[in-house]
Amino acid sequence: MRLVLGAGGLGLFVAIAVTALFWTPFAVDTITITDRFAALSWTHPLGTDQYGRDIVSMLMAGAVTSLSVAAAAVVIGVGVGAPLGLLAAASGGVFEAVLMRLSDVVFAFPALITAVILTALWGPGAINATVAIGVFNIPVFARLTAAGARKVLALDFVDAARLSGKSSARIAVEHVAPNVAPIVITQAATQFAIAILAEAGLSYVGLGAQPPVVSWGRMLAESQTFMAIAPQLAVWPGIAIALAVMAVTSLGEGLRAGIDPRLQRMGEG
Amino acid sequence: MTALSRLFQLVVTLLAASFLIFFAMQVLPGDPADVLLGQNADPEAVAALRAELGLDRAIPIRFVDWLGGVLTGDLGVSATYDVPVAHLIAERAVVSLPLAALAVGLAIVIALPAGVGAAIARGRPVDRVVVAGALVGLSVPNVWLGLILIFVFAVALGVAPAGGFPGWDQGFGAFGALLMPAVALAAPQAAILTRLVRAAVLEALDEDYVTLARAKGRSRRAAVWRHALPNALPPILTLIGLQFGFLVAGGVIIETVFSLPGLGRLLFQAVAQRDLMVVQGVVLVLVSMVVIVNAAMDGLALLSDPRQRADRPKAARAS
């Protein structure tokens, strides 16, 4: 049930974002000052903002930013973190100890702090936000994969594979990775949800996507100026963010429920 | 793991984190003197500033020098305000720290009863409401919650200030200014904590000692609060520690929403003005706080759970 709702919800957001790449009801980069703060109508179902831009179109364009930043941040986390975790568990010893300490250090830098550092160095932008959230995800996936891999490596079939003459590298790729994958994918859903929230927060404070790129977080920031005259502007982006996070969280929980119970508690090990 | 080796780990983590910060702020930009004076600066002025800031020395020496300063409370001098960075941080921390403490307190006060109550009422309407409420709570961006609070209580009802901080000499007014930001900051934390408390208590409820307590005649409620909850405490404490990083980051953003003169605003101003010493100092303070709170909560989790203590004799553990 949660799985269906979550997957359906995420699918809907992805479909909206993909559509927005080619088409939005109105252009989001043109200012029509005579239309500003338009009320709800058939032409503008959710009204317009302070520049007369159509809110529905803005939300659609914002979905592109939000989903692509979040997806890229998770890909960075999984792409770097999972192989490192696998390597740490397979090699053990000093390498594992150093890697785990290092992940402690990186974990102490919330995405926002990394984004601040990157912005101080290179100026603000969506790329910085993506990298900052992605870097924060690396230790999350490294630890999870290492913990899972350690448990799998202790199982009998790994010994059997080793006796049949397979190398450590082959065992890691052929036996450990497929067994750890479900738990990594589940965590990816959780981190995706966190990344959507982080992107919104970073955009709100101006460390994310810059104009003219539309983002939900900056829509919230801009709405604050006009709160007394057009409070509705703050409502829609917030609902969009909350629904997207809810869909991805439900998807993650649905996936978690389907995982082999023997592996379920791996992340805590 | 003994307390001593944990302490050693903490120190190593702090050292590595501070080197990372130093490297990012002092080495990566190439030359902080160039950053401070801008692209078109007079080369002689840049050279003079380099000498003044000690940038002509080797990187390891500069790091040790900076770290030595940090340990004695000297975080350098702000380029824009021309006052010690430590003063700026102390001035802003009196807003940020109470805000964080208030948010953690609120989150715990909400999450413990909600999580335990839901676990006791497993599967019943109360449980369903708590679970659904927690999902909503962790999905709502705290920026948005802050904006809604401002709209309802400041714009529509006019019973609270829309932002700003009157200073602690205003007593209750100062506390009032922190209340809405703390609620916005605490909501997602409370939601995440509620889910964990519920799960941990549910798990503990299946344990033999809870059955035994019930068999000895304790009420269900008493069995949960006296037996299940203490045993569910270690993961709860660890999570509070792990969430602290999100709280620090969230606090920085919430300070912007409510225009609070805290560390977050200082950080953003410093970034905008390219005041690297201030950025470096604030980031160091925030990251150190995350590391220390994490370690402290881990330690507390260990102390609160006799089963996890490695240094206890085996016989005592088995009993």
Image (cartoon, coloured by chain):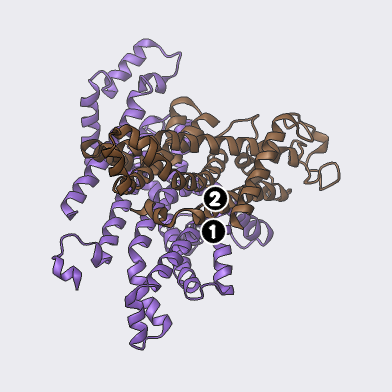
Chain colours: A brown, B purple
Q: Residue at x 19, y 68 (%)?
A: B317
Name the secondary structure under disc 2: loop
Name the kind of residue labelled 2 in the image.
Phe
x, y (%) of residue A101?
A: 27, 41
The quadrant holding residue A71 is top right
Dots 1, 2 in contact, CB < 8 A: yes
x, y (%) of residue A61?
A: 68, 35
x, y (%) of residue A173?
A: 38, 35
Residue furthest to the front in view is: A164
Of residues A57 and A263, the one nearer the viewer is: A263
User: Would you call the spot at circle 2 few (<14 residues within 10 Å), some (14-19), or many (20 or more)?
Assistant: many
Can residue B152 be seen from the camera position used here? Answer: yes
Q: Chain of mark 1?
A: B
x, y (%) of residue A168?
A: 29, 34
In the image, taking residue A122 as reference, residue A147 lies left or right, namely left
User: Would you call the spot at circle 1 few (<14 residues within 10 Å), some (14-19), or many (20 or more)?
Assistant: many
